[in-house]
Image (cartoon, helix red, strand yellow):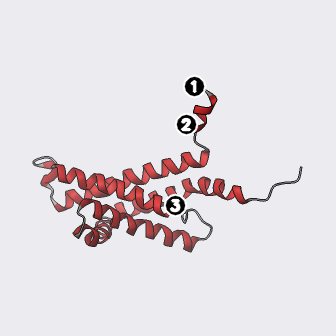
Amino acid sequence: MPARTTRFLTLTRGERSLALALAVIGLFGGLVAFILVVRVDPAAFFGRGPSWYEAWVIGSGGVGTALALFVVRHRVARRGAVSAILTLLGVSLLAGLIGGSLALPLYGTMFGPFLFVVTLAGSPVLALLWCVNLVAVHMLLCAWQDERDSIFAPARAS
């Protein structure tokens, strides 16, 4: 390939970290949605198999979580523990809002964040894994934030 074409196909270290963080949180959001579907209707996967709508709910959980992180990505991985905790809490609630809106446009917008919180409250292990996932995403996005902040760093004298 010519050099001009390959320039657009390569990602920097920070961009790769952002892509990996979006993929990781999206997969974990889909897992949380899967657990939500199984808790609402245990026969969905163990008795009759999943319906198209249940598969849609799981997919919207993953996509909604990735979109939530993408929307708030500029606030994640900033300095300060309180800021990080509040931002990651916002990502969690926004993930429930977007995922619920995708799954069921009107009622899902209301009940998405509520069901997300209830699902995490009903399973402490899942809540702990969700927190570990958010910390991992925070650490992944540190490289992306450092790369973004380096644009504004003063140039060194040679």
Q: Is residue 15 left or right of residue 59?
A: right
Disc 3 versus disc 1: distance between alpha carbons? 32 Å
Residue at image position (58%, 32%) is: 5
Describe the element under mark 3 as helix, strand or loop.
Answer: loop
Indicate the secondary structure of the residue bearing disc 1: loop
Q: Is residue 38 above or below residue 4?
A: below
As measured in the structure, the alpha-carbon distance from the residue carrying label 2 to the one carrying label 1 is 11 Å
Within the image, what quadrant is residue 112 found in? Answer: bottom left
Residue 106 placement (x, y as % from top left) = 23, 69
Q: Amino acid at mark 3?
A: Arg
Distance between the alpha carbons at the discs numbered 3 and 2: 22 Å
Q: Is residue 139 visible?
A: yes
Determine contact: label 2, label 1, CB under 8 Å.
yes
Q: Where does residue 53 sit, x and y in percent of width and height?
A: 18, 53
Amino acid tagged 2: Leu
Task: Point out which mark residue 1 bears.
Answer: 1
At horizontal 55% and vertical 53% (from top left) the residue drawn is 140
* Residue 77, picture quadrant: bottom right
Task: Tell me which numbered mark, 3 or 2, is placed earlier along the sequence.
Answer: 2
Query: Which class describes the residues within 10 Å of circle 3: few (<14), some (14-19), or many (20+)?
Result: some
Name the residue tied to disc 2. 9
In front of the other: 83 or 126: 83
